[in-house]
Image (spheres, helix red, strand yellow):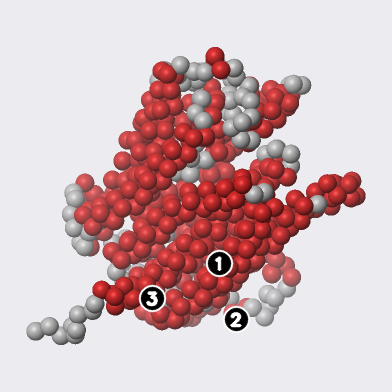
Amino acid sequence: MDNSGPKKTCAETLRDFFTSAKFLIYMGHALSTWGDRMWNFAVAVFLVELYGNSLLLTAVYGLVVAGSVLLLGAIIGDWVDRNPRLKVAQTSLLVQNSCVIVCGILLMVVFQFKEQLVELYNGWILTTCYILVISIANIANLASTATSITIQRDWVVVVAGQDSSKLADMNATVRIIDQLTNILAPMLVGQIMAFGSHFIGCGFISGWNLCSMCLEYALLWKVYQKTPALAVKGGQKEQHQELKQLSHSTDVENSQSPEESSQPLMNQASVVAKPDSPKEQGCCDQVTEPLRTLKSGWVAYYNQNIFFAGMSLAFLYMTVLGFDCITTGYAYTQGLNGSVLSLLMGASAISGICGTVAFTWVRKKCGLIRTGFISGMAQLSCLMLCVISVFAPGSPFDLSVSPFQDLYTHLIGEKALPEVDQSLATILTSGNATTPAPAEEMPPLQSYMSVGLLFSGVIAARVGLWSFDLTVTQLIQENVIESERGVINGVQNSMNYLLDLLHFIMVILAPNPEAFGLLVIISVSFVAMGHIMYFRFAFKNLGSRLFLCCSPEQKEETVDSPSLPTTV
């Protein structure tokens, strides 16, 4: 007998979906990501334009952003853990969008009155404006990091409930939104700046963030109202068990081993420290508290069972095999124009979307941990094309040329700097600019074999890359307790930025095209090391069953979290 009640009409089903907490999260994330992508693209262009077609300000901004997340990732995550979810989401949203709005207005003033500002106090006012723009933009990025941790790593888990399949679908949808906005948003703001001006571009971004902030704020409130579980920080069962363990630890202070005493992390530290807090309210203690939080966060990350899975994801950031400024710059040196590169970036986005779709299908067939193993092997296999491209016809790879020769020439050579400025201006300006190479020196057709193999491998590897990224993301979501979810994801972001910084340093040390093949080999080596770490994690949890494709519902897919001490 059917007790489900009257069957819903199509209109009612659509209404329920468009008013569900899941769809509202998608809408809020789309608005947030669209604004982020527009700003991240535009701020680099603005800084280059302001400093006379030099990459100095852009490089300084990138270094400040990466260094800030690297140092403050754990502290931001700890702040996310310590405060109510709605407060964290609303505060980070307001700070992020307000900073972007202020930066946009400040840049409008600089673009409008740059000539006058140069003459004031020997240009120190203009320099102060540059410092303010970079500092405020860095604060916006830190707030964006907090938003990403609390929404994508916490709210999504709570809205999905205990349904692992629903969580996987939500993660995949969020990643598809990221892929689409990563292409469409820069295209929009780029067209506005091309047909309008940088002044209009700044005004558009400021206005967008003002409207988006209001809509996102309302969407967050709606999601919070529709999901009562968001009001409870941590599951009731876990919270009750954790409180019992903490109260026991305060009665028997020395009965725990050092490893056990570090497991509950921030909550334990706050509870245990309360009796001594009246004695330790001095200035020195307040200054060192962020350092203790930073240390505790990294220790907690190391003690997680998913440590090697997280490290494997971080190692994938140590690569030049992505569609960033480094790979596109190399493509320019090999004769590819902007039109071809835009098509390749579109193909890369499609490949990434295929990876997110493949993730949900493979996870249902083989389970979560095996999905990461399969995705890693697929990515590594595709990257072999990039290694082959190093030795293919048309490759500029030449070990007889010192990797440091180009760096030395640019730093010491008397005529190097004008040549760099001219070539940089050529790349940054439109296609109407004259190219240094004469038309008769265009590379022959066979010379494109190397760069073709390179980009074929990069694009094909995106399927495995995004599927692997989603696997590790869900492993962290499912196996880190709610009271530590923020700090663990904060440390994960720090690890990602650390390896990303190392790959930029690697390029700075070997910037000439002849050494790019060496960078490709090093990049593939780091990707391989990352997947070896994941294999260690997967084999530890599944053993020989890793190579047997079976139903994901089996308990062999469960990863025991070390954050809750067991009695075994």
Left/right of residue 172 with respect to residue 41 in the rendered view: left
**Does residue 486 appear in this view?**
no
* Residue type, label 3: Thr
Left/right of residue 148 with respect to residue 471 in the rendered view: right
* Residue type, label 1: Ser
Q: Secondary structure at mark 2?
A: helix
**Does residue 191 appear in this view?**
yes
Q: Which mark is residue 240?
A: none
State the residue lying farthest toward the left: 1
The residues tagged by marks 1 and 3 sit, at their Cα atoms, a distance apart of 19 Å
The residues tagged by marks 2 and 1 sit, at their Cα atoms, a distance apart of 45 Å
User: Image point 41% across, 46% down: which residue?
Assistant: 349
User: Image point 64% across, 61% down: which residue?
Assistant: 206
Left/right of residue 359 with respect to residue 342 in the rendered view: left
The label nearer to you, 3 versus 2, is: 3
* Residue type, label 2: Pro
Compared to 481, does 69 lie above or below? above
- The residue tagged 3 is 19
- The residue tagged 1 is 212
Q: Secondary structure at mark 3?
A: loop
Q: Position of residue 142 (x, y in %)?
A: 60, 60
Q: Position of residue 526 (x, y in %)?
A: 44, 38
- The residue tagged 2 is 275
